[in-house]
Image (cartoon, helix red, strand yellow):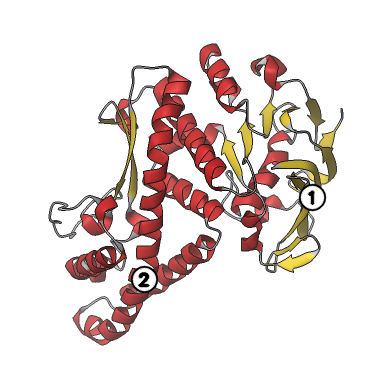
Amino acid sequence: MIVSHLSLTDFRNYASAEVALRAGPNLFVGGNGQGKTNLVESIVYLSTLASHRVSTDEALIRRGAESAMVRARLEHAGRQILVELQINRSSANRAQVNRVAVKPRELPRSITSVLFAPEDLALVRGEPSGRRRLLDQLLVQLIPRFAGVTADYERVLRQRNTLLKSARGARAAEAGLSTLELWDERLVELGSEIILGRQQLVDRLRPHIVEAYSNIAGAGQEAELALQLSILGAQPDDGGPGMPAAPPPDADPSSLDAAEVAERFRTALTRVRRAELDRGLTLVGPHRDELLLMLNSLPARGYASHGESWSFALALKLAAAAVLRADSTLGDPIVILDDVFAELDEARRARLASAIGDYEQVLITAAVFEDVPAPLAAYTVHIRNGRIVE
């Protein structure tokens, strides 16, 4: 899969932009704040329905405009696909594939990508929410219907939290318990599907993370992944005061089937019921799980050096690209390196360039041309102040 042409209207700082792209490496060079990242961000949004920089769509629309348009012409196996997305400030977004209207959440069926960015260091050093988001975005690319599952789960979670807040106090709690139980079942149904999807994904990522870390950092260190479930007692987001002690996990999450996950979810909700009513907050579920990153049997968060953390973050993305490559009927994912080489020493630059060199299309942004290894700089586009200048 490659993007052969990208067209933007009122997206970020681009009033209008037309960019021809090639198979293999494509390098965008420009100073900070000129718009090179905005170009690749538009492709990331098409494939994941999310930005790696902001949490709301409004920031993607150019100041003074009511909507932004992203069009990408895709090529794979002799076929061309035109994907279009209109991002609206005050109404629902709209999408088309080959001029036929589709729901925006259908777009990942047509395009996949993997992004490497400086923000990825937070995958190792940051809070669990970033690692959960990584898994969920990859799930959406592999199984697009998960966009609906995760959206429905978030809606149920908000409704349940609202009910818990209103049910504080003994009398209110008694009155609201029957309604709460209805929301419990929906939470369990959707949450169990997310938990199982994430666990299957982690199982698929494991062999690739070992190889990818070795490719980036060199031999001699062992990287590992594990999913910690709040329904089994893990509390990566800190249960807080009043949280009852959880029994030690008596099962490997990967050994649980759908029925067992649902049953343990219900048991966990019963265990924390009083704490939830006291705090007005849902305390167990996939929104409080953790993707644990281990390096030489120690948690990478808190133990890994800066270089090791960068290597682990890059290895996570390489593993994601390998899973997408193996699973997709669309060919390779589009590999995007957003201002990454400036963060790496010369040895890691060379290893990363080698690791992604055989993907069908690689898009690279850099402020300094010399930061990018020569094999990736054969086709270069210069950008200045929201304009393609060369």
Camera-side residue: 57 or 111?
Answer: 111
Q: Would residue 138 appear left or right of 80 to someone viewing this image?
A: left
- Looking at the image, is 369 positioned above or below residue 95? above
Amino acid at the residue labelled 2: Glu
Q: Nearer the viewer, residue 100 or 27?
A: 100
Residue 99 x/y as whole percent: 81, 63
In primary-sequence order, the first of circles 2 and 1 is 1
Q: Position of residue 327 (x, y in %)?
A: 53, 47
Residue 342 picture quarter: top right
Looking at the image, which residue sits at the far front? 77
Q: Position of residue 287 (x, y in %)?
A: 37, 57
Question: Residue drawn 57% across and 16% down?
Answer: 350
Q: Report the residue at 50% width, 65% height from top.
A: 151
The residue identified by callout 1 is 80
Image quarter in which the N terminus is found: top right
Looking at the figure, which quarter contains the C terminus? top right
Q: Which residue is mark 2?
A: 189
Horizontal relation, residue 238 to residue 6: left or right: left
- Labelled disc at residue 224: none
Q: Amino acid at mark 1?
A: Gln
Residue at 63 percent of width and 62 percent of height: 106
